[in-house]
Amino acid sequence: MRLLIIGSMDGQIGAASKIAIDRGAKVSHTPDITSALTLLRSGKGAELLMIDAILDIKTLCKSLEEERISAPVVAYGIGTNTEVAVRAIKAGAKEYIPLPPESELIAAVLEAVCEESHTLIFSDHSMKKMIQLTDQIAPSDASILITGESGTGKEVLARYIHRKSNRKDKAFISLNCAAIPENLLESELFGHEKGSFTGAITRRIGKFEEANGGTLLLDEISELHPRLQAKLLRAIQEREIDRVGGNKPIKVDIRLLATSNRNLDEEVKKGTFREDLLFRLNVLNLKIPSLRERPDDLKILAEHFIEKYSKINNLKNKPLTQEAIDGIKNYRWPGNVRELENTMHRAVLLAKNEEIGTEAVIQQDGSPLGVNKKESIEHSLNSSETSLIEEQEANKLVGRTVAQVEKDLILDTLNHCLGNRTHAAKILGISIRTLRNKLKQYNDDGLEVESSNSSFRAA
C-alpha cells in the first residue's frame, strides 16, 4: 500500500512511519499540502494520506474533491486531544491517530484502507474452476475482460489478478468510468496540460501514466462514450497516449483490465460499443458466477462478514442459527456478494441473542430474507385472501403517475444501496448520468438528496 505523510517527520510520526513500513506500506513524505498536491498530480499517487492535524485539513480535502483525487485522509497529532480530533474529522479526515503511535492502531488503519474485501473467499466448485483459470493467465500481460452481475466482486478479482501478476510490485490504478462526468473522463484517463481547458490550473497526470509499469483497471467500461472509445483503442494498440492539450505522444507500459456488468456483444449490436475495442479488451474473458450459482460460498462468506463487522463495531462474534443459514441459502441475492455483505452488517447490529437468527437477517426494508413481502403474505394466506391482497397492492398504484412511481423506485433503490449512486444505477439498469439528472430534478422539486448517504428529506 502507498502511504503519503504530510507534515513534519520529526518526533513520533517517524515511529509511525516505521511501523507502516514494517507492515508492508511504501511511505513517501511531503512537508506541506501544496507539495502533497503536486506529488499527487504528478502520478505518484497514494492510497492513504496521513496529515498533521495542525495543517489545513479542510483545504486538502476540498482540493482532493475538486481535482477528483481519491484517497482517504487520516489526521495525526500529539496525544489524545479530543478537541483536535473532532476538529480534524469535521474538516474531512476519516480518522485521528494520536502520537506516540500504537502499532496495532497503525495496522488497523492500514488494514481498513487495504480492505479485507480484496481477499477472495470461496469454496464453491464454480468459483474454484474460475480461480484456476485466473491463476493460469494472471502472470501474462494479456488484457482481460471481467464480466458478471453487479456485486459479484469484479474489482476484487482484478486486484487478485494484479497480485498474481509479474507487475505486483508496481501500481494498481482503478478508474470507474461510470462515476466520472463525460466531459472530465478524457482528462482522468490521459491527463492534461496546464491551461488546456477552463479549470486546468496545473498539469495533471492521467490514470494511464499513473499506472505505468503496473496495472490499469477500467471499471464499468461499457459507460465509456464512443468518442473516448476510439482514443482508448489507439492507446491500447500503440501503447501511447496524448495528454489533453499536449503536443507529443507519451509511451506507457501497462497491463489493462476492464469490467462490465453488461453483455458487450449486445452493446456492439446496439452500436454503443466498438467491436474493435471489444476484441482488444477481450483477449481473455473471466465471468464471475452470480452468488445464486455458487451456493457453497454462502455460509463461509456470511460468516466472514459477520466476523469482519463484529470486529469493526466492537461486538461479540456470534454464530448463525440453522434457520438463518437456511434463509440465506433460499434467498436469490439479486445484489450478490455486495448485498450479502450489507445484510450481514445489518444482522450484526440487530442481533439481540447469543446467536444471529432470522429476526436479524432481514432485507433493507425489514421484510424476511427468504422471501419478499408479497411472497411472505402468500405463504400465510389462502388463495382468496392472496387475491384480495394482490388487488389492494395493485390499487395502490392506481391514480399515480408514472413519474411518481419511478421516483419512489429510484429513491428506494438508492436507499437499498446505502446511498451509493453507482450501485443503484446498475440495479435500476440506467446510466449514472441518467440517475444524476433524476436526482437533480428531485432536488429542484424540493426533495433534498444527500450525496454522501441515503437520506432524503423535504427541503
Image: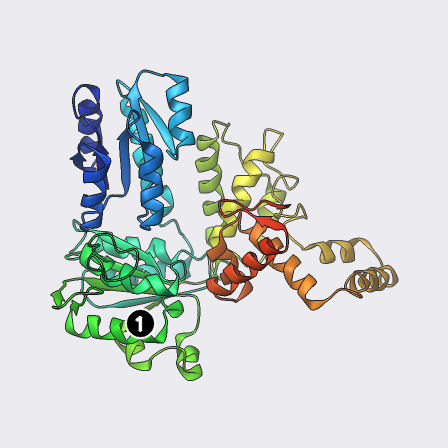
- Element under label 1? helix
* Residue found 65% across the figure and 48% down from its top: 365
Q: Nearer the viewer, residue 75 or 354?
A: 75
Q: Is 370 drawn above or below residue 303 in the view shown? A: below
Percent position (x, y) of residue 247? 13, 68
Quadrant into which the N terminus falls: top left
Task: Give the quadrant of residue 400.
Answer: bottom right
Q: Which residue is mark 1?
A: 228
Q: Is 431 drawn above or below residue 277 in the view shown? A: above
Query: Would residue 35 be visible to someone looking at this image?
Result: yes
Left or right: 9, with 318 as reference point: left
Q: Nearer the viewer, residue 381 or 433?
A: 433
Other-residue count near label 1 (Cα within 10 Å), few / some / many at <14 / 14–19 / ≥20? some
Q: Is 62 drawn above or below residue 253 in the view shown? A: above
Q: Nearer the viewer, residue 56 or 306?
A: 56
Task: Give the quadrant of residue 240.
Answer: bottom left
Percent position (x, y) of residue 154? 38, 58
Query: Would residue 287 be visible to someone looking at this image?
Result: no
Q: Amino acid at mark 1?
A: Leu
- Residue lying furthest right: 384
